[in-house]
């Protein structure tokens, strides 16, 4: 046990990403919905992996990417998520610890479910289509929540993808309860519009009663409130959360808190190669800003700059030290 305060603890599906370029006709052939995240079983993961072109493997997972971005910005953080004690699991653990992040979640035994992976197909327009085999990530339970670690964090950050498994859902609720009891903030990313469709009522309850900071893109927030207009969704969410950080791709982002509305321009300084991780890294920058005492607008600007770095190359982990790029140090 340590008394060191953390800025953010992320909780999510611990996955290894496999990224590959693909044409639109490949998505049609494989019956994939472009731009979506689909949960798949082991046999489908094997067949799709075999059909994909050459790929690049790297540690990933939505909250894992966010924590990597936070570490690159200089924040102190930790991560909670399940991997198996196999090659990919050990690589995942090593990567987090090498970044200076606390990661002590007990690994699944070698004969358990293998470490999860996300097969990501990137089309020429830089859109990413994700196919996720959760594997060992599904084994997250409330017993994996380190209450001391949660209580030491200014903010906990949880991905909506966790909601697809009952044990992880209860782990989420436990972490939120521990954080609030310690006087800390709870943040949630809605993750994916299809995820919102599956769990709309429960996400609405979370937004209204348990989440202090909500992250969503335009499609996700409109899906949550079942409206076609972004401004309508904005009016709904401002009455539910203390802060909502809503990304709009090339239109930038809108940060709303009560009567405050901050418009943040997109950072268009680089080219768009791969949109994988854009939302994850926006969350990195925004959470870094607010945990360092910056105002909402400046935090949103840091989020936009971090997102711009991640979409300028293949993969969802920063290739540049973000503290130097964004903060000049």
Image (tube, rainbow, N blue to C red):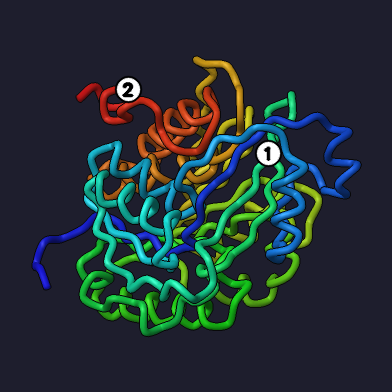
User: Which element carries disc 1, helix, strand or loop?
Assistant: strand
* Residue for badge 1: 128
- Residue count near mark 1 (Cα–Cα under 10 Å), binned few <14, some 14–19, many ≥20: many
Marks 2 & 1, CB-CB < 8 Å contact: no
Give residue 94's position: percent from left, percent from top.
30, 51
Give residue 326's position: percent from left, percent from top.
33, 26
Give residue 243's position: percent from left, percent from top.
45, 56
* Residue at left offset 39%, top offset 44%: 284
User: Which element carries disc 2, helix, strand or loop?
Assistant: helix
Toward which corner of the image does residue 141 lie, by quadrant? bottom left
Whether 45 is drawn above or below 262: the answer is below
Q: Is residue 207 visible?
A: no
Give residue 15's position: percent from left, percent from top.
51, 56
The C terminus appears in which quarter of the rendering? top left
Q: Is residue 28 left or right of residue 152?
A: right
Whether 212 is drawn above or below 289: the answer is below
Q: Which residue lies most toward the front here?
A: 111
- How many numbered badges does the structure rendering display? 2
Q: Could you tell which of marks 2 and 1 lies nearer the N-terminus?
A: 1
* Residue at left offset 84%, top offset 36%: 26
Q: Is residue 250 left or right of residue 47?
A: left
* Residue at left offset 63%, top offset 61%: 133
* Residue at left offset 34%, top offset 77%: 145
Q: Residue 270 versus residue 212: which sits nearer the camera?
A: 270
Q: CA distance from mark 2 to mark 1?
A: 25 Å
* Residue for badge 2: 325
């Amino acid at each position: 046990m340590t008394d060191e305060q953390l800025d953010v603890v992320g909780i999510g599906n611990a996955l290894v990403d496999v990224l590959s370029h693909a044409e639109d006709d490949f998505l049609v052939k494989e019956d994939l919905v472009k731009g979506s995240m689909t949960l798949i079983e082991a046999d489908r993961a094997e067949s799709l992996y075999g059909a994909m072109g050459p790929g690049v493997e790297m540690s990933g997972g939505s909250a894992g990417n966010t924590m990597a971005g936070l570490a690159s910005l200089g924040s102190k953080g930790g991560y909670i998520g399940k991997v198996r004690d196999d090659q990919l699991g050990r690589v995942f653990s090593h990567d987090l610890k090498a970044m200076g992040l606390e990661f002590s979640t007990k690994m699944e035994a070698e004969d358990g479910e293998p470490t999860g992976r996300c097969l990501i197909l990137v089309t020429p327009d830089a859109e990413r289509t994700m196919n996720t085999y959760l594997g060992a990530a599904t084994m997250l339970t409330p017993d994996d929540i380190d209450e001391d670690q949660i209580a030491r964090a200014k903010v906990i950050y949880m991905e909506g993808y966790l909601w697809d498994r009952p044990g992880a859902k209860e782990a989420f609720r436990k972490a939120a309860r521990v954080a609030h009891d310690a006087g800390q903030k709870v943040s949630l990313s809605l993750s994916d519009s299809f995820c919102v469709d599956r769990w709309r009522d429960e996400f609405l309850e979370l937004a209204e009663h348990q989440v202090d900071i909500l992250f969503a893109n335009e499609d996700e927030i409109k899906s949550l409130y079942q409206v076609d207009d972004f401004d309508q969704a904005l009016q709904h969410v401002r009455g539910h959360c203390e802060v909502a950080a809503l990304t709009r791709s090339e239109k930038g982002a809108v940060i709303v808190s009560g009567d405050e509305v901050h418009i943040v321009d997109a950072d268009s300084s680089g080219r768009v190669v791969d949109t994988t991780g854009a939302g994850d890294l926006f969350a990195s920058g925004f959470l870094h800003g607010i945990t360092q005492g910056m105002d909402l607008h400046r935090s949103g600007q840091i989020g936009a700059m971090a997102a711009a770095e991640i979409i300028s190359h293949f993969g969802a982990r920063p290739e540049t030290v973000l503290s130097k790029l964004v903060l000049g140090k």
